[in-house]
Image (tube, rainbow, N blue to C red):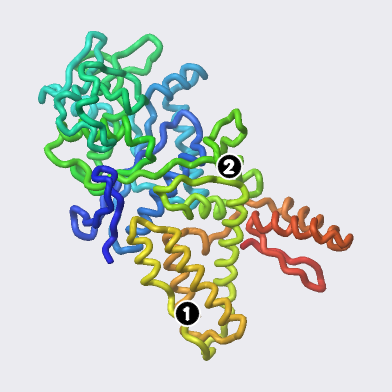
């Protein structure tokens, strides 16, 4: 079965065929580094990690580029408000972002370009659009793309061209779908921007957000590449505008597949600081939740479905991971040469699910159904040694995509773990079984496996 991916451009699932056999060029929209990434952002990066890992699992050589937007309206406003140097501030937040990705076992991009390093290329791209008559200058030194000159405008977001507001323009980076209008390729310098401006033939200023991605992606991947990803909030205006300008800047189709992940909500509601449900990664780790459980929670819902994030769901994720880790542990203990039942790994079911637009729930279902059979055979001491070896190899193979089984969480605090175990031991001595069970569940959510022995409670990280 061939890999099929849902292409936002055509609104259909299509067979994925790379431009160059055996190689995939992948661009994913990275963060605007004015604040730490929240879990909604991280959900998108997790989807992109699963996509890349599965492409590599399938044998493709992937070149992955993720941009860092270190100059735009938000970064400049934040730097000036806090009286900080723009590049110092954005680099600090970028480094925190990279640590967050590493904590969640998200593979680092092969290239992580900063927008401020590619402004000369952006100026050259804007000049090309001016020379080709699809852009125009304004009195304040800004340059705008003329959407009336682009017959394909609106394809990505499925806008009726007749509804476009011809002749109107905006310098805002974010605006609604019903506000489609000429957008800024270059923003003329304003006093509120402080020192953050660059020289260009049409006047001092800085590039627009959309231009940044066109230039950085094409610099590393060429003017025509395979896959461009982001969240659904990127479809309009960002990706629509990026596609429009690239169509006229380059003499190629630009991108073959556009993939977008759905929103994340928390406890059934949109994230909001006023509701107290706005999380960044460190806040969740400080609650004793493990990176593996958070990773599993973010990946286990199909990327095109809205994810309802709850702390209970994270705890259930930890139990699922613990079960797979326990399976690996028990498989490793089967004696060499042991005779018994043959149980084949679900490679065909796993591949069929993942080939269907990364149907992760189907893939996980195949793995856990197989795990149930293995546990039953292990309980009867009836699993053959060859099946044991095949099962361990298969688990390691699937985990190249999942990234949650053969890992160890160093986050959970040892002193905190031992304190909770003491509390549980006391609850058991007081015959407070409900309290003891609750503490065991809390420890399990931290990735801690307990073993009650005559000598006391032993523990290990799952």
Horizontal and vertical percent position of residue 453: 78, 72
Residue 420 lies, with reference to residue 34, above or below; the image says below
Which residue corresponds to the image point at 55% horizontal and 37% vertical from the top-left? 269
Of residues 384 and 6, the one nearer the viewer is: 6
Horizontal and vertical percent position of residue 316: 60, 56
Of residues 135 and 124, the one nearer the viewer is: 135
Tag on residue 284? Answer: none
Residue found at the very far right of the displayed protein: 430
Q: Does any portion of residue 390 appear in the rendered image?
A: yes
Q: Does any portion of residue 215 appear in the rendered image?
A: no
Residue 293 lies, with reference to residue 249, above or below; the image says below
Choose top left, top right, bottom left or bottom right for residue 261.
top left
Label 1 SS: helix
Which mark is nearer the camera, 1 or 2?
2
Horizontal and vertical percent position of residue 179: 31, 23
Left or right: where does residue 67 sit relative to residue 286?
A: left
Q: Label 1: which residue?
A: 389
Horizontal and vertical percent position of residue 107: 42, 51
């Amino acid at each position: 079965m061939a890999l099929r991916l849902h292409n936002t451009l055509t609104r259909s699932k299509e067979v994925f065929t790379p431009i160059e056999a055996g190689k995939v060029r992948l661009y994913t929209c990275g963060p605007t580094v004015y604040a730490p990434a929240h879990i909604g952002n991280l959900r998108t990066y997790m989807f992109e990690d699963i996509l890349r890992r599965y492409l590599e699992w399938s044998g493709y050589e992937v070149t992955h580029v993720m941009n860092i937007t270190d100059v735009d309206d938000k970064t400049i406003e934040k730097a000036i408000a806090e009286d900080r140097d723009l590049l110092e501030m954005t680099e600090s937040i970028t480094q925190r972002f990279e640590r967050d990705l590493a904590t969640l076992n998200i593979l680092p991009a092969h290239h992580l370009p900063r927008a401020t390093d590619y402004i000369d290329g952006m100026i050259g791209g804007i000049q090309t659009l001016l020379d080709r008559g699809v852009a125009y200058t304004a009195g304040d030194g800004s340059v705008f793309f003329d959407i009336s000159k682009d017959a394909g405008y609106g394809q990505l977001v499925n806008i009726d061209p007749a509804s476009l507001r011809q002749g109107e323009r905006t310098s805002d980076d974010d605006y609604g779908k019903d506000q489609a209008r000429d957008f800024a390729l270059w923003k003329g310098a304003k006093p509120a921007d402080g020192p953050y401006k660059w020289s260009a033939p049409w006047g001092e200023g800085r590039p627009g957000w959309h231009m940044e991605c066109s230039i950085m992606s094409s610099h590393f991947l060429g003017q025509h590449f395979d896959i461009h990803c982001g969240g659904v909030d990127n479809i309009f205006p960002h990706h629509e505008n990026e596609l429009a300008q690239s169509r006229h800047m380059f003499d190629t189709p630009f991108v073959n597949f556009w993939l977008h992940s759905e929103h994340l909500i928390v406890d059934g509601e949109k994230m909001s600081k006023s509701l107290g449900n706005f999380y960044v990664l460190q806040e969740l780790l400080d609650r004793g939740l493990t990176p593996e459980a958070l990773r599993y929670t973010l990946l286990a819902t199909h990327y095109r479905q809205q994810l309802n994030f709850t702390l209970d769901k994270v705890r259930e994720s930890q139990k699922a991971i613990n079960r797979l880790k326990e399976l690996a542990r028990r498989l490793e203990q089967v004696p060499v040469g042991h005779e018994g039942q043959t149980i084949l790994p679900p490679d065909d079911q796993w591949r069929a699910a993942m080939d269907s637009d990364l149907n992760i729930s189907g893939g996980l279902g195949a793995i856990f159904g197989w795990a149930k059979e293995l546990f039953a055979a292990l309980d009867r001491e009836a699993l053959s040694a060859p099946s044991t070896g095949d099962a361990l190899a298969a688990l390691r193979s699937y985990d190249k995509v999942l990234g949650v089984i053969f890992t160890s969480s160093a986050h959970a605090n040892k002193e905190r773990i031992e304190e909770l175990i003491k509390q549980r031991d006391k609850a058991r001595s007081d015959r407070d079984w409900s309290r003891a069970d609750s503490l065991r569940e809390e420890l399990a959510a931290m990735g801690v496996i307990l073993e009650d022995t005559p000598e006391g409670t032993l523990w290990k990280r799952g």
